[in-house]
Image (cartoon, coloured by chain):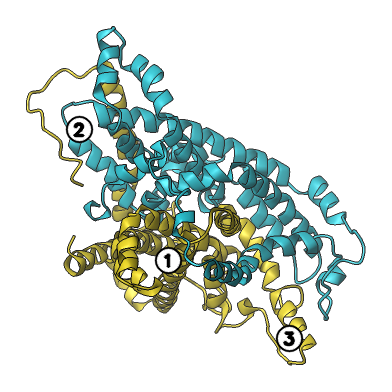
Amino acid sequence: MATVARAPRPRWRRPSSFVLVVALALLIYYMLFFTAPFIAALVIGFLNWDLLSTVVPVGFDNYVAMADDRTFKNALKVSAIFVGAYVPIALSAQLILGAILANMRTLPQKVYLTLFFLPVVTPWLIAVLMFGYLFNTQAGLPGMLNDIFGALGIDTSFVNPLGSKDTALLGIMGMTGWKFLGFGALIFLVGINEIPLTLYEAARIDGAGAVRQFRHITWPLIRPIMLALSITSFIGALQIFDPFFVMTRGGPGDATNVFSLYLYRQAFDQFRFGYASAMAMVMFLILLILSVSQLAIARTRWEY
Amino acid sequence: MGVLGDPADTLDAAVIGRQTSLSTFGSRTRANLASTIIIIALVPLAIMAGLPFIWIYISSFKTDMEIFSPTLVWFPSTFYYDGYIYVWEETALVRGYANSILVSGASVTLSVFTSVLAGYLFAKKDFWGKTPLFIFVLSTLMVPFFAIFIPSFVVYSKFLNLKDTYIALILPHMFTAFGILITRQFLHSIPNELIDSATVDGAGDWRVLWHIILPLSRSILAAIAIIQFLGVFNEFLWPLVMTDRAELYTLPVVLRRVYGQGSAMAGSNRILAAGVVAVTPIVIFFLIFQRQIVKGISLTGMKA
């Protein structure tokens, strides 16, 4: 944030028409569509409101209700498992792929980047449609694997991961990993390319191999990018909604009934807008704490 | 955000091409053998990335019986294209596409325009309250979508009465804090003398903007346009709650309908055909613009 604090101008001057128009437009727009809804969410969280009948203020009841709501607690748990498992695994895979791509010649690198990037630009709903069939036992990947292993004389019985309580979340996790692998890899690739080549040359002269070069040069210099990606990945992963809503619909049972889906259903199926708003506030707080604590840990451990 | 290093450095490097991210790889390769092994080792991963696309193309020409045959049918026995006829005649897919392009196109145009206006304001203008305003705009980046989702729905549907209008889908993307931030960083690198000399010649802010700033920032604006387009095109939850009339459905909302119509077996061929029709333009768009897309995301990704 160092760039924000530029030389202050204490004396007030009449701003030009350009400054006035743009600054006011910015102020009004963000007040109207960010500040106001955010404050409104806070307020609605203290109400009982179905948008049609009268508003009933209930104080902290919505927040108290969450503590007794078993489905909510389950949603919190499912989301925690999803985010907690997905983010570290995905980031590691993205970093490894990015490092591999960085060491590649231009042509194969381009080909691979194209392939890994196609899922990134594919909208979620198309991915959902494709994986709906790719996951299918008869029509998709499980059938293919059974077929291939069968031909090798090994009897396997892979089934649709979304059909079982134990593997449904894993299935969506795999799909999410597939969708974002290329994105993270590209970010890491760009970061690695910013590292001066002379550092690697010096290390090589000192006799350091590829692994030690990664550990002592790439990793320390890539950590700020890791931190930024980690924060945005947590924020993004907790808010993933489309595959849960369209593919698994929270099932089987409540195995994939994540926070975002439960929030949506409370509002738009149960018309408990107050309760859903209170949940949105809880989500905001969770994300804020996650982001701030990561920044704090990075600051004390890595000393920037 | 101070931990992330100076983003302007990344921008300069990629825009000016001092050390473009995609050109330094050859020099990093070590032994030829090792790199060949790495290239081959990535093939299975690349197949996983591409499989959903290939599989949906092949499967869309299978009959429902072939798709759900107890023993996997790898390739269709006949060129069965009834699903495509159905998609063309019976679904709103084309309309959905048109709506999505309209909404994304309008959002991109508006947000690129406002990004350059606000970016110029924050980079080159001094006025009272500039720093607080900038921090305020930045702080909106910290607010997750779900935190303002419900009150935004209430505001748009109840108070502004914008439900079932294109405006409701475009307005949330009119300004983008991240676009403003990136344009501002970029414009910092443009020397003040360039603007001053024009101002001395009598050009006002709007003319400076149009004749100097806009041509110079073309590459950064293209990057913002791409990110913004991909984001808006992918959007599902907001159009889902904002549109009840089928004529206004965007592509993801149409796809959700189509996907939801398939029972266990009947109509699968049609759904797969719909998937192909939906994904093909995106694949083509990506292959044509992949250089710009990859560059755009590598320029802006860490901020997104």
Q: Chain of mark 1?
A: A
- Where does label 2 land, which residue? B130
| Nearer the camera: disc 1 or disc 2 | 1
Q: Which mark is residue A149?
A: 3
Q: Which residue does the image show at 44% across and 59% down from the upper left? A: B28
Residue A100 x, y percent position in the rendering:
48, 65
Q: Secondary structure at mark 3?
A: helix
- Residue plotted at (83% across, 56% down): B83
Which is more toward the observer, B84 or B211? B211
**Where does the image place residue A140, in percent across and percent down from the top left?**
72, 73
Q: Nearer the viewer, mark 3 or mark 1?
A: 1
Residue at image mark 1: A95
Q: Residues within 10 Å of mark 1 (few under 14, many from 20)?
A: many
**Tint of chain A:** yellow
Badge 1 element: helix
Pinpoint residue B151: horizontal percent, then vertical percent. Answer: 39, 49
Which residue is at the front of the view, B135 or B283? B283
In this rendering, would A93 be left or right of A22?
right
Given contact means CB atoms under 8 Å apart, are the residues at marks 2 and 3 in contact?
no
Q: Nearer the viewer, mark 2 or mark 3?
A: 3
Q: Colour of chain B?
A: cyan
Task: State left or right for residue A28 relative to residue B99.
Answer: left
Give neighbour class at mark 3: few <14, some 14-19, many 20+ (Cα, 10 Å). some
